[in-house]
Image (cartoon, rainbow, N blue to C red):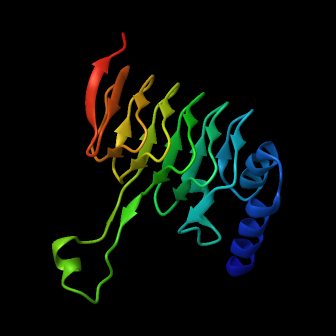
Amino acid sequence: MNLLRKFLLNFLLQNIPSCIMRAKVLKVFGACIGSDCKIEQVILLNYDGNNLDNLELGQKVYIGAGTILDVKDKLKIGDSTKVAAGCNFSTHIDSGKENYISTLYPKKESAITIGSNCWLGLGVTILCGVKVGSEVVIGAGSLVNKDIPDAVIAYGSPVKVIKNIR
């Protein structure tokens, strides 16, 4: 049954032409989606058929095309946040268990929280365990590997806070 749910959801996400309808479909499958959300064609990672409740979007959230949503752990995005195309939200890291690298970088799962009224530029990557405050701008191509406070502009790889905006 879970395999059928995975197949059906992925089919619908890739074939429904309306970004508003995609948000409604995710809600039907168990995600917590606020009103007036728009979701372009996205890629769901680690959806096992039952864990879509790990995805929580506030009201008026926009998610751009090609964005990767890893729902292994909780992914929460606040009201009126805009996510440009090609972003990556990675709620876990796992190099496998059959190699030496796994001893250096053990498996980790941790939630990602993005505040309200944020703007994430094209191709931003947010790593597991990160909390981004409200009213934050993250520049295109940034690697967010640490928490970001409220009301700042930050960019870079790794990300650095560049300017306060209040």
Seen at 76% across and 51% down, the residue is: 22
Seen at 56% across and 40% down, the residue is: 84
Q: Is residue 126 left or right of residue 72?
A: left
Q: Is residue 34 above or below residue 14?
A: above
Residue 7 placement (x, y as % from top left): 73, 75
Quadrant where the C terminus lies? top left
Q: Is residue 96 left or right of residue 44?
A: left
Query: Which quarter of the figure has residue 163?
Result: top left
Q: Is residue 98 above or below residue 17?
A: below
Residue 39 placement (x, y as % from top left): 69, 45
Q: Going by the picture, which residue comes out furthest to the bottom?
A: 98
Q: Is residue 110 left or right of residue 87?
A: left
Quadrant where the N terminus lies? bottom right
Seen at 74% across and 60% down, the residue is: 13
Query: Which quarter of the figure has residue 14?
Result: bottom right
Query: Which quarter of the figure has residue 130?
Result: top left
User: In this orientation, which residue lies closer to the viewer: 157 or 150?
Assistant: 157
User: In this orientation, which residue lies closer to the viewer: 52 or 81?
Assistant: 81
Residue 156 placement (x, y as % from top left): 30, 39
Q: Is residue 5 above or below residue 66?
A: below
Tally of numbered discs: 0
